[in-house]
Structures are given as C-alpha cells and as structure tokens.
Image (spheres, coloured by chain):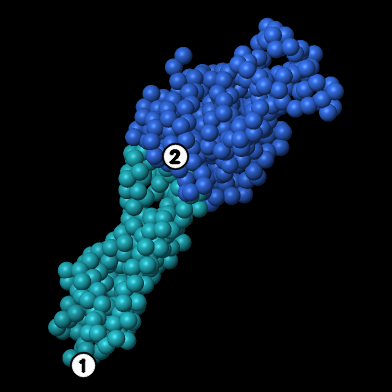
Amino acid sequence: MSDAIQIERLHYRAGKTFEIKDLDLHVPAGSIYGFLGPNGSGKTTTIRLILGLLRPLSGRITVLGDPMPEQHARVLARVGYVPEQPHLDATLTVGELIDFQSAFYPRWDQARANELVRSFELDDDQLFGRLSKGQKAKLMILLALSQRGELLLLDEPTDGLDPVVRRDILSALLTYVSERGSTIFISSHLVHELERVCDWVAVMDDGRLILEAPLEKLKQGTKRLVVMDAPAEIINPPFRVLTRESANGGSAGENWVVGDWEPGMTSYFEGVGASVRDVIDLDLEDGFVELLRSFRDVKGGVRR
Amino acid sequence: MIAMFRAVLYSQWKWSRLIVVLGTVAAFAIPLLSLQGAARADRGALRAQELLHAVQAWGALYPLLATALGLLMAIAAWAADHRGRHIHALTLPLERWRYVLLRFGAGFVLLAAPITAVLIGSSLAILTATLPPGLQAYPIALAVRFAFAVLVAYAVFFAVSAGTARTAGIILGVIAAVILVQVVASIANIDLNLFSAAQTVLALGPGPLAVFTGRWMLVDV
C-alpha cells in the first residue's frame, strides 16, 4: 500500500519554546488515520506543515506523491481541509461560500454539496457568522467533501460539538470514504471518537511522535498486567514496559502497562522468577494515557 | 481562472459595495457641483477667473476621493482574509501570487465605477454649462488622471494591507525614524530637510505620487 502522506525527518521550530524534531510519519492511502495528542502537542502545526502553510527547517513532506510545499497548488486541488477554528468569511452566506469554493475546484461535486446542505439542514441564505458552532463545522465538512479530494485533513473537526452533530459528521465522513476510498487524516484528543472510526493511529506529544501503528495492533498489544514477585530490574523484555507501579503497597504485586504484548510472552516472567496473575485489556484511551505517561517519564528522566 | 475571478469579484463586491456606491455618487457629483451655477456665454474675463477659482477649489476633492477609495477598497480586499488568518486563502489550490492578482484585479474592476462616474459627471457638467470664451473643458483628461490616482492609491494601500502586522510595523518604524531624525536635526541646528527631500522624490514629477499634486481642473484656459 502506498502512502498518501509521507514525512521524513521533519524539523520545524516555532519561536524558542516549541519544535517538531525528527518527525517520521506514514499515512497509508485509503486509511482513516487518527492523529492523537494532547493540546499543544504539535498536531495542528504538523497539519499546517503538510498543507504547505508552514515551511520546515529540514526534512521532506510528500503528499499524494508530490513534494510539499513546492507543489502546493497541485496538491491542494486534491486535498480537502477542515481547520480547527472556523476560517470562512462571516459576512458570506452558506450558498455564497459554496459558490465561492466551487469556483476553485475543478472536480467540485455540486450534487453532493446540495445533498449535504439538505442532510445537514443548512440554510443557503444564512450568514456564516450567524451559524451555530455545529452548523459551521457541518458546512466546513460539506465544503471539504464536495471537493472530491483524495485526502481529507481534518483538524479536530468535532471538538466542542454535541454528540448528535458529531455523529452526523462522522457518518458523512464514513459514507464518503466507503464511496471514494479516500484517505482521512483526522487529528483529535477525543480518543473514544477516533477509536470508532480509525484503522491507524499516531500519538504525538511535545513535538515528538511517540507511536504510529495500526489501531488493532495497538489495542491488542497494549495490556495491563498484574505481576507477582516482579524483579527490580527488567532485562531485555520482549515487550515495552510503559508504566509499572505497586498495587496495594506491593502486597498485591505490581501493575504494569505494556506495549507490543503477545499472548505467549507470560513465559518471560517465569524466566525471571516472577509470574503474571492477570492480563487486562485496555481501551485506546487507557493505552493513550499510559503511552503519554511513559513518554513523559522517560523524557523527565524517570528510570524504570 | 474566469470562474475564480468571478467568485473573488463577487465576494469583494459584497464587502465593499457601500464604498463603491458612495464613491461613485461622489465621483459623479463633484464635477457637476464644481460647475454649479457656472458660466454663461456673456460672462467676461473676471467671471471666468472666478469660475476657474471655483473649479480649482472643487478640484482638491478628486485626489482626496481617489486616496479614500484606494485606501478603503484595499482594506476591504484583505479584511476577511486577515480575520481568518489567511488560512482559507492559503489552502485554495492556486499559486499565491495568482490569488493576490485576483484580489487586486477584482478591486480595480470595482473601482471602474467611480472612475466612469467622474467621466460621465464631467461630461454632463460640461454639456449643461456654457463656458466663457477662452476656457476649455477637459473631462477625459480629468477622468484619466482620476483613474491613475485611484490606481496608484489602491496599489500602494493594497500592498501595505496585504502585508502582515510586522510589515505594517516596519513601514511605521521607517516613518517614525525619519521623523525622529528630522526632529534631532532641527534641535541640533543641522541643515537637513528630510520631508522636503521625500516630497521631491515622491510627489514631484516623475515621482510615483505626482499624480495627486498640482491642479485638478475640469475647466481651464
């Protein structure tokens, strides 16, 4: 499978405090790729770099086979983008914004736009500035989908919306993907939401990529273990130890959160004089939180 | 590209229609008002002199109107993009210089209305007035000069308005530095007149702002 987005050794700095360093990202074509991270982790900056709105200090960005930002006009004709904040002119009506947008995209799908206006219950004559937050989000999704892009870049598109609007938007996205086989790159900190739709996830924190993996692999491989008689030092485990802490002051063993776990790995503990009393599945949100904790502990110099 | 231009033109019309309408009315009215109660054929040399004074006084309004139109249209052209932090414009699938050209062209097309209004207003004023002997009307020259002034004002303010706050800060900084140097030179009794030098370079022919200076006469000898 080829990559819709390929980022290699990207380096970008904004001011003195924030930088994205050595970022490698591969978004498979046709995937729904969830880009997770807490606020301020660099998700929006990365999306802006992908769109050519920012210039990296070094590294390479390839979108739909073309280098960015060099080929931005060519690439943007095939990319739909929904930014985090509404960016459209408040004084134009829904109909005027649709007309404006349609003039710039040769593959514009007016029939889809009309259909989405109806299904999203938008009023053509209403000013963008007078729309509710949910209606604005719906209109921006409508514009992105009607461009018939091969890639949709969505920056927290459902953040702060009520569950009904979120469901409408996600449903429209899934319909679009099933019809066109396009790639969707969706950033969010709403982990549960991404868990329902994504097949790949990447986790970012403080400008660094912590993890990039198929969602199923991440969910299958991230477990909470209850370990009895755990050794103080762990030598070359076949899995990644994300966190470990005593349960009930140590009398009930230790709770470990591990990544890249496979069922046969309990034998590792027997080899070091320990045993696994329980293996507990974690949902994506728990896995995400533990990953972040682990990354921050390592960055902060906490030794495991 | 035509569809894009039409889309940009429509949005710009919506943002600046009040400016265009008021500017067009003013541009139409000024020539008519400048010859109000003008000249009959029986007026002598002294009356012709009075008429020229009146036309000259009204003539000061043309460069002011051109400057105001250029400034307001340039601000209107970029205001929406500035509010959206240019995200929408920068994610449209066209080269950035093309987008700037579309915005510039749309503004200038809209400015054709007040320019045409000056031509029509001047021509009507001349048709309805009788000029004293020795005086000539120059409606086309006046309209062409107004068009140049509007274009220059629009181009200058468009360029400034297109820039970031940092660009505006640099321009204001340069102006402040010039003023500061002039003030220091005055205090130190140094023979330096930067304002005069700037005026010579910019406002006297063939300076870029020369079109705004001098007499704007619909009727002259």
Indicate the secondary structure of the residue bearing disc 1.
Answer: helix
What residue sits 51% from the left and 29% below the top? A152
Query: Disc 2 vs disc 1: which is toward the camera?
Result: 2
Q: Which residue is mark 2?
A: A12
Nearest to the observer: residue B182 or residue B125: B182
Q: Is residue A200 above or below residue B114?
A: above
Supply the letter of whichever chain is cyan.
B
Q: Is residue B177 above or below residue B56?
A: above
Q: Is residue A75 visible?
A: no
At label 2, counting other C-alpha atoms closer than 10 Å, the crowd grade (few under 14, some 14-19, many 20 or more) is many
Q: Which residue is mark 1?
A: B46
Q: Position of residue A47 (x, y in %)?
A: 49, 35
Q: Are marks 2 and 1 on the same chain?
A: no
Residue kind at label 1, given as amino acid type: Leu
Say if mark 2 contacts mark 1, CB within 8 Å: no
Supply the letter of whichever chain is blue.
A
